[in-house]
Amino acid sequence: MSEFEGSKIYYFKNIGNNPILGRGDPLRLFFNDAGISFEYVRVTFAEWPEMKQKLIQDGHRMPTLPYLFTKENKFYGTTAPLLRYISKKLNKYIPKDPEEEYLADAYADLYLDWMSKWVEAFLSKESDAMSNYENEYCASQHANWNNILGDKKGPFIFGDEISYTDFLLYHQLNNDFGAKVNADKYPRIAEFVKAIQNRPSLQKHFETEKKEFNDIQNEKDQ
């Protein structure tokens, strides 16, 4: 049994009335795919300052969301490094070849840059910030990732074997456009999205995601 079984993962509640935006969902995807049970604790923006201050007081050096506590009350923070660490502990989701392991790390950094650009556009007061992000920056990212996926045979970044970096990429595509992509222009990304969404281990995840969107819509309609 993984030491991360039964962990509590903390992240913001419904950024922009959307249950998957931001940096928390790659952890949910990963844990669900790996079959590791967890509780996803939603934090409101009002609750976060006090929670952050307590993390600092308790001596945690990464007082940012997302973070998790194991059942043994051990703290782990940040998204990509945590996925990488758990992958190594599981001996799964991480390439065995040293060069591919390096590329997994490098591609994870590309995701972090991409997510930072989204945050910048999301928080910007400029009226055209998000449209510029979606029409220009995302287009360049889609072209690059389509090429990355084309470097190997198989639907995932490193071919037929899924890696932690695949969860980061899928999340960013879902974060931006609900994982919808121009299949004619970016066929390898379209193949990748289909492969993720068809994974038996993630069907419950996607059912939960759909329910969360429906619940938010129902609240709006009331």
Image (cartoon, rainbow, N blue to C red):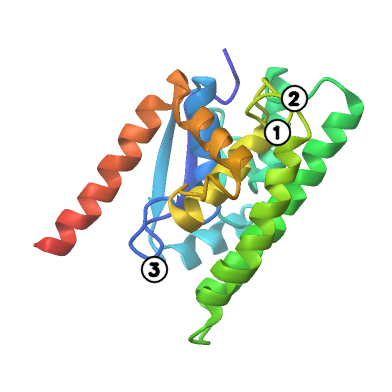
Left or right of 101: which side holds 41? Answer: left
Q: Report if residue 24 is visible in the image.
A: yes
Which quarter of the rendered picture does the N terminus lie within? top right
Which of the two residues, 110 or 134, is positioned nearer the viewer here? Answer: 134
Q: Earlier in the sequence, mark 3 or mark 1?
A: 3
Which residue is label 3 attached to?
A: 46
Quarter that holds the C terminus? bottom left
Report the side of 73 relative to 218 (left or right): right
* Pointer 1 residue: 157
Task: Name the outermost residue toward the left.
Answer: 222
Q: Residue at x 80, y 41 (%)?
A: 105
| Residue 88: assigned label | 2
Q: CA distance from mark 1 to mark 2?
A: 18 Å
SS category of the residue bearing label 3: loop
**Mark closest to the chain's N terminus, 3 or 2:** 3
Element marked by disc 1: loop
Q: Circle 1: is it few (<14), some (14-19), or many (20+) Cα within 10 Å?
A: many
- Please state which amino acid type lies under the numbered disc 1: Ile
